[in-house]
Image (cartoon, rainbow, N blue to C red):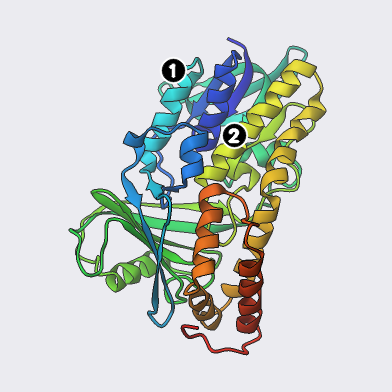
Amino acid sequence: MSYDVFVVGGGPSGATAADDLARAGHRVALLDRAGRIKPCGGAIPPRLIADFEIPDDQLVAHITTARMISPTGRAVDIPIENGFVGMVDREDFDEYLRARAASHGAERLTGTYVRIERDRDGTHVIWRDKASGEERRSLTKLVIGADGARSRVAKAEVPGGDKIPYVIAYHEIIKAPPANDTYDPDRCEVIYDGRISPDFYGWVFPHGKHASVGMGTEKPEADLKQATAALREMSGLTGCETIRREGAPIPLHPMDRWDNGRDVVLAGDAAGVVAPSSGEGIYYAMVGGRVAATAARAVLKSGRAKDLALARKLFMREHKTVFRVLRSMQDAYYRSDERRERFVSLCHDIDVQRLTFEAYMNKKLVRARPLAHLKIGIKNMLHLTRLVSPVHV
């Protein structure tokens, strides 16, 4: 069978692209290797739930408070006003998205991507069937590479695809304890402590009957398992049963180019679309899948390969400023424990709390409060220049 679009990778990005294209009436293949669960805190904002029509039964927890913890143990609780942060388990959530794409007409294929070949008949995706172990050959007009931070599609087909910088994320899914003085099933915890991560952060995210406990770092010498063990001890979770352990690379910033100008466009982690500072990826992956599908539809309609560039243009038009602000924040505050202490101190400010979560929930910078922005900017400058001490101010 030949396809209009062959999607490589069945995570949130690839599944979203396949679903959008199938709903539009295109012949779509969705290739996923199956059996792998990406390490992920699992947080999704209300905008994702609305934009991508996620049913409530996919949410394993509704988070109403975020706790920021500094290197000295200072804890700042931020209430999530006018909403909540949803939590999903990637094992079930990703499969739900793949099944939804299939229900709308996408053909699911189970196996691994090998390479792309081209001849007089067109573009062929060579992939290895998981059941038989044999190589298959699928003719397609376009390919969407949604195969992760170390994308083989990107490496072979798109300039710069072999040079994507990334951090390594590792987490352990544990059996959640009953609510107690240190664990709240409605509260996520973000730990800014060099003992856990020298350049990023650790987390404890409730998942209903389970919880995700993990950390990320760009430092290759860091011992991820030892750091996570320390985090579990710090959080009173050492005695909890471990369900599974997972690790994977997380890209640091969007690639400068997402397509090869011919027949391939990237999406999700393969294109580098993970938010700096927060490491948030699910929402941006799904948006990346949607804009990749939009670009593919444009090419199929116009016949112009240059329309593949539409994917990056659409994404960056809406999210470039947010990514730039988050990158500046990460560069300013994640470099040392002294800076992390100051960052958590800033989180005491009620305007910081409100603007941060309004931006997170709606995925855009909040511009309606100029005086609040001015005050935050002044406090930020005072902390970075060390003109104030990192205490509750």
Image quarter hosting the N terminus: top right
Q: Is residue 283 visible?
A: yes
**Disc number for residue 289:** 2
Q: Is residue 39 above or below residue 121?
A: below
**Residue at (56% x, 54% y) in the render:** 359
**Disc number for residue 237:** none
Q: Amino acid at mark 1?
A: Ser
Going by the picture, which residue comes out furthest to the top?
1
* SS type, badge 2: helix
Q: Is 88 or 168 nearer to us in this picture?
A: 88
Q: Is residue 136 visible?
A: no
Q: Amino acid at mark 2?
A: Gly
Q: Position of residue 76 (x, y in %)?
A: 40, 72
Q: Is residue 274 left or right of residue 129?
A: right
* SS type, badge 1: helix
**Residue at (82% x, 22% y) in the render:** 304
- How far apart marks 2 and 1 lie (CA) works out to 18 Å
Residue designated by label 1: 103
**Residue at (35% x, 36% y) in the render:** 56
Give the tally of numbered discs: 2
Q: Is residue 146 above or below residue 134?
A: below
Q: Is 139 or 54 nearer to us in this picture?
A: 54
